[in-house]
Image (cartoon, rainbow, N blue to C red):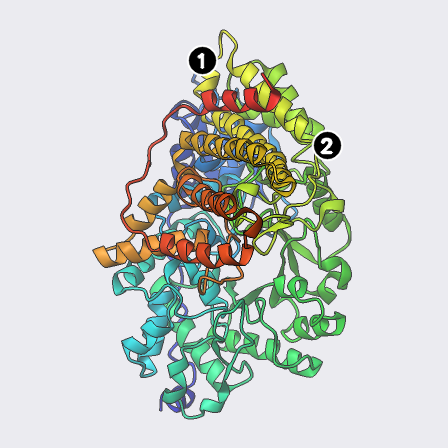
Amino acid sequence: IWQLHMMQIGFVLLTITAVQALSGEDAAYSVINSVLPSAISSQFQLELDSTVDGFTVSLGDDLDTRQAKIKVTGGTGVDLCAGAYDYLKSAGSSSVAWDATGGSSFPAVAPVAPSSPISKSTKFDFVYAFNVCTYGYSGMWWWDWDRWDHELNIMALNGVNNPLLVLGQEYIWNAVWEEMGLAQEEIDEWNAGPAYAAWFYMGNLKGWEGPISSDYRERTRDLQGKILEKARALGMKPVLPSFSGFVPDALASHVSDPDQIKLASGWNAFDPVSYVEPTSDLFSSITASFVSKYCAEFGCESDAKNYWAADLYNELSPPSNDTDYLTSVSSAVFDAMKAADPNAVWVAQGWMFHSDPNFWQTEQVKAFVSGPPANSLIILDLHAEQHPIYESTDSFFGTPFIWDTIFNFGGRSGMYGRLEQLTNGIMDAVNGHTTMVGMGIAPEAIETNPISYDLQFDHVYNTELHEVDEYVQSYVQRRYKSGDEATLQSAWKLLLRSVYNATEANNDLEGAMGNIFVLRPQWNATEVGCCAVLGDLYYDPQDVIDALGLFLQAAGEDDAASLTSETTFRFDAINTAVQVAADYARVVYGDVQAAFEAGDKDAFTAKVELFMHVMNLADELLADQPERMLGFWIEKARGAASSDDEQDQFEENARMILTLWGPDKNAPLHEYAYKLWNGLISTFYNERWAQFFDMVTSDWAEFSQDAFNGEIVDWELAWTKLKGVDMITKPNGNGLDVAKSVFDLVSGA
C-alpha cells in the first residue's frame, strides 16, 4: 500500500535543490531591451548590488560620451527594472500597460540622466500578482512563452516580486497519482479542462471540460521551467502550488485507510470533490510526494524561503466550525509543508473570510490563522480595496498579510475604477500599524482598466497618498506622445469624476456595472447572470459621452495623425465609445419594454431596431483590436493544442467559460465572465436578443419567459459546441470612425 510505504521511509526522498539562476543584470537587461525602444534602453546602465535597498538612479560611469548614460543600481533585477521605469515616469514620458489595454507608450529619446542621485526603496517585502482565477479568465492556460515573457517583463517594470506561478503542476500530480497506483483513466476522469484549472486546483470542480493530454502536461511543465528561471533571475520570490487536499475519487481504492478521504461541501451545482482530511497522515504523505517531485523538477531554494499556495476552503465550507478543529487543520497543513520543505512559508487566499462571513466569524478566523507558527503563514487580503478583512480582524490577529486588489470579477468588460478609494486604502493599511508585509493585485482577470493598475503600482516605490487629480494629469502626459494635451486632459477629468469614481457607497459592485448587451434576455432585469448589477449608474453617463466627444475632437485636429495611430489613444477612445453605447442601450432597453407593456407594436419594432443597431455598433468598435475579438481568443486557444481533437476541446473550453460556464445548460454562473468582444457580441449576444424579440413579437400577449428560457439555453449550449467557425482575427482599423457614429447617435447629431 502506497501510504504505508511513504510513512515507513518518511520524507527523506525530498532534496531541496539550490536554484541556479541567470545573472540578475542580464535578466534585467532582457526586460528593458524587450519593452523599451532601443533608443531608450541603450541609454541605461544597470548594476546589481545586493547591499542596495531598492534602487538608485544616477549618472552613468562613462562620462566621455556626449550624453551620460542613466545608471540604475538595484538590489535585485526587479529593482533595476522598476528603477529604470520609475525614472522614465518621473520624467513624464512613459507608461507601461498590457497590449490588450492599449500597450505601452514611450518618447522618441531617453530623458537626460539626473544631475544628482535619486534613491528609492519600498515599504513592501512582497509585491504580489495574480489570483488563481486569473489563469482561467485571462486565458493564461493557452499563453506561449512569448506572452509569458512579456508578462514577466511588465511585472518587473512595475516592481512585482511575488507572482503566483502555478503552471506545470498537472505534470507533477500525474506522477504522484501514478506512484500511488492510479491508472491513467482514473486520473483523466478527475482532471478538468485547462480553462477550468483554477477551480480544479481549489476543489470546486472535477472532470469538467477535461481531461488534459500528456502533451499539454509536458508543454506547461516546460513553460513553467522557463517562467521560473527568468522570475528567479530577476529576484522574484514566486508563490508555487502545493497540496490543498483535493484528490481523485479513485484514490480511495488505492490507500490503506479510505476513511481519510471525504467529500467537500460542493460548489455552484458541480459534484462535490473528494478531499483528504488535513490532519491525517495521508495528507502529509501526499504533500511530501508532491513537493519533492516539484522541487526535483523545477528547483527550490535551499538557503531562502519557498512560498507555497494552498487553499482548502475557496467558497467551500469546512466540515466543522469548532475552533480547535480549525486550528488543528491549519497547523497540520503547515506542518506537512514544513516537513517536506524546511524553508516553507504558506500563502493562503483570505477570500473565504469575505465570501462566507456567516461561517468565518471572528473566533473561526482567529483559530485558523493561529495554527501555524508565527511568520509561517501569509494571508492574501483579497478585495481589500473594497472589503479589507484586516480591519475587522485586528490585522488577522498578528498574521502577516498582503493587501490585495481584485478590481474585477470574471474579467467582465466595462469602464470602472475607484481611484480615490484605492490610494486611501493602501495608505490606511501602510500607516495603520498593521502586520501588512506587502501589496498586490489579485484580479480575476488582467487586461482591464489600465489606469487602476498604473496607480496601484505607482505606490510600490512612491508609497504616499496620491492626489488623484494630479496623478491623472501625469498619467495622460505619459500615456500619449502627441495630440492636444488640454483636450485629452479635459476628457480624462470627465472620466475621473464618472466611471473611475466609484466609492464606498458602491461597494456592492463586483467591477463594472452590468451590461445590458450580455443579459440573457428578459424584462425587468436587475442583474446580469448571478453577479453583475444592472441598477442605476453610479455616474452621470453624459460625462462619458462628453469625454468621447473630446477624444474625437483630439482625433480630428489637423495634426492628429500621429495621435490616432497611437494604440493607447485608440484603446481609450474606442473603449469610451463602447461604454457610451452600452449606457445608451440601457435607456433603449427601457423604451423597448415600455412599448411592449403599452401594447404599441410600432414603437416596439422601432426601438428594437435601435437597440440592435447600437449593439452592432459596439461589435464593430471592438474589431479595432485583436485582443478584443472572439476570433483571436479562439485562435489562441486552438493554437495551444497538439491534435485536432484537442483543438476542438480547447475551443469548447474557450467558448464555455465566457458564456454558460458550467456544469450544464442551467448553470448558475452563466455570463459570470462575460466579455464585450467583437464576434462574441455578433454571434452570441446579438443572436440571443434577436430570438427573444422574435418570440415576443410572435407571441405578444402570450409571451412566456419560461418558454423562452427553455429554448435559449439549448441554443446557448449548442453555441459552445461550435468548432472551427471562420472569425475575424485581425483588426479592421475602423474603430474611430465607428466611435464617431456612436457619438452622433447618442448626442442627436
**Residue 292 drawn above or below residue 97:** below
User: What residue type is disc 2 on?
Assistant: Glu
For the residue labelled by badge 2, is the local secondary structure a helix, a strand or a loop? loop
Instruction: Sort mark 2 into few (<14), some (14-19) or many (20+) by Cα contacts within 10 Å.
Output: few
Which mark, residue 467?
A: 2
| Residue at 58% over, 65% down | 348
| Residue at 52% over, 19% down | 112
Residue highlighted by disc 1? 561
Can residue 60 be seen in the rendering of this structure?
Answer: no
Would residue 643 appear left or right of 394 to someone viewing this image? Answer: left
> Which quadrant: the N terminus?
bottom left
Residue 527 screen position, x and y as percent: 62, 50
Given the current orientation, which residue lies at the most extreme top position?
558
For the residue labelled by badge 1, is the local secondary structure a helix, a strand or a loop? helix
663 or 248, nearer to the observer: 663
> Which quadrant: the C terminus?
top right
